Amino acid sequence: MIRGWRARRLDTESLVAGALGLLAEDDERLERFFALTGLTPQTLRQATTGPGFASALLDYIVTEDDLVLALAARLKVAPQEIAAAQSALAHRSED
């Protein structure tokens, strides 16, 4: 569970799975994500287990309103919950 996240309706694993699923459904979104992060399909699996990956992934998602809205719809949460989770994860990775 993400500490400090008021809604606490999602865990980090659900967020990551939802965000990656969203990106994987659209080749352009996925290619842009790979281009900006330097990841490849071959390195993605290992990257997901690294510290800070969930925070970095949500940092990417919140850069585009359409991604936030799509992820919120996919996870059946309010868009504000995605932003709150991103903020909580960012603070957690700073510790």
Image: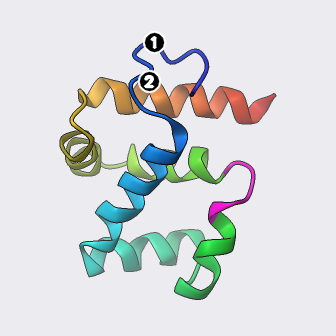
Q: Residues within 10 Å of mark 2 (few under 14, many from 20)?
A: some
Residue 21 percent location from the top left of the image = 34, 64
Identify the residue at image location x=39%, y=16%.
7
- Determine if the magenta segment contains residue 35: no
Residue 10 percent location from the top left of the image = 42, 32
Q: Which mark is residue 6?
A: 1
What's under tag 2, amino acid-wise?
Answer: Ala
Q: Which mark is residue 84?
A: 2
What's under tag 1, amino acid-wise?
Answer: Arg
Identify the residue at image location x=45%, y=69%.
33
Instruction: Give whichever of discs 1 and 2 has the lower sequence position.
Output: 1
- Marks 1/2: CA distance? 8 Å
Q: Are marks 1 and 2 in contact (CB under 8 Å)?
A: yes
Secondary structure mainly formed by the magenta segment: loop
Residue 82 percent location from the top left of the image = 37, 33
Residue stretch in magenta? 48-52
Residue 32 percent location from the top left of the image = 40, 74
Q: Is residue 31 above or below residue 54?
A: below
Q: Which mark is residue 62?
A: none
Q: Is residue 60 left or right of residue 72?
A: right
Identify the residue at image location x=26%, y=31%.
79
Q: Is residue 4 above or below residue 19?
A: above
Q: Is residue 31 visible?
A: yes
